[in-house]
Amino acid sequence: MAYAQAKHVDAGRIPVVDITPLRDGSDPATVARALHAASRDMGFIYIAGHGIGADLIDAARAAAFGFFHASEADKATVTVSENHRGWLGQGGAKMQDDAQADLKESFIWGLEDASGTMVDDHPLRGRNRWPAFSPDLRAVSMHYFDAAHRVAHDLMRGFARGLGLNEAFFLRTAAAPLSRASYVYYPQQDVALGADQFGVGPHTDFGVLTVLCQDSVGGLHVQDLDGDWIHAPPIDGTLLVNVGDLLSRWTDGAYRSTPHRVVNRSGQDRLSLVLAFDPNPETMIDARDVFGQDHIPGEGPISCGDYLIWRFKRAFSYR
């Protein structure tokens, strides 16, 4: 028995882009070109200058570990709802029909106002499920959600510029987004489980854009253009973002949604802070809006909401 293997490659294979000049307006064009080039190649980008403070990241990690280290009975009080909010236990997700269930656990939440209210007019958004045994979890989690969502908006403006579009193009219908955040916990993976067992199995992300804050443990593998699996180690002070399937579809494959997986062979618990950015459910994903009405895309238009419902039904056992 053995772990699934991945290559260690030279630094720079996954580019690092400092988005400070995009955020402060001093040189957005240069950042946009760098984001555009990286999205057409690996589809994964380390983001420096993102603006999320280390204190907030540390607080979110501490709150998340407090949740995952609680008893199964406590976590079960916020078992994932039909709106995909709450705790999804080990074995609750499977990225491919013929794959083994993932080892990870997740706690998932989404946008809400100060009173805890959220529009529930779509099957993938609704009231968050905050555990009574962790009274501080809500505040720090919503703070992190807002900060990571701002990063996603900055990046979407950069991608639009890189494509020669108005920088607000991808954000025109994003006032009530389907975005969701999650804390994702990966237990140490026993080698005896074999090379076909993963913390999260090989997959591409469903939505538009993923903003990932790794810890220092590592274990993320990304598939390069040659089909080889390579390590995507944490780089201090950066986030790792990747193009999702909907952004790839929106750009008719010009931006690459790259397969990735997690193998936690570190001997330690691994934790990721994840923000999956998606606009309003009615947003039409149509490559002709990007490239012009004479363009003939490989896939027809579909709403963001309908696409995500279809993908979620395939991946999560509770649905």
Image (cartoon, grey):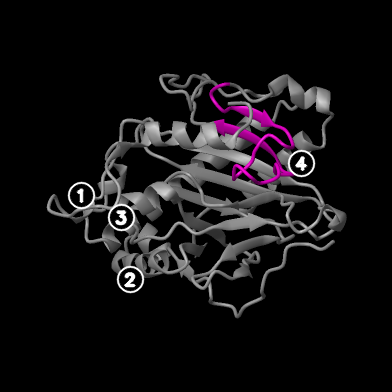
Apparent side of residue 119 relative to residue 5 in the rendered image (left or right): left
Report, in whole angstroms, how far the alpha carbon at label 2 lies from the one at label 4.
38 Å
In this view, 135 is above or below 3: above
- Judged by depth in the image, the label closer to the viewer, 3 or 2, is 3
Residue for badge 4: 65
Q: In what element is the residue under mark 3?
A: loop
N-terminal-most mark, 4 or 1: 4
Front-most of 206 and 66? 206
Could you say where residue 74 lies in the image, as x and y percent from the top left?
80, 24
Residue for badge 1: 288
Q: In what element is the residue under mark 2?
A: helix
Residues at marks 3 and 4 touching, judged by CB atoms closer than 8 Å: no
* Amino acid type indicated by mark 4: Phe
N-terminal-most mark, 2 or 4: 2
Few, some or many residues within 10 Å of mark 3 (<14, 14–19, 20+): many
Report, in whole angstroms, how far the alpha carbon at label 3 lies from the one at label 2.
23 Å
Q: Where residue 252 is drawn, which disc sits there?
A: 3
Could you say where residue 305 lies in the image, as x and y percent from the top left?
39, 32
Apparent side of residue 237 relative to residue 15 in the rendered image (left or right): right
Residue for badge 2: 30
Q: How many marks?
A: 4
What is the span of residues highlighted in magenta in the rendered image?
82-109
Could you say where residue 319 lies in the image, as x and y percent from the top left?
58, 26
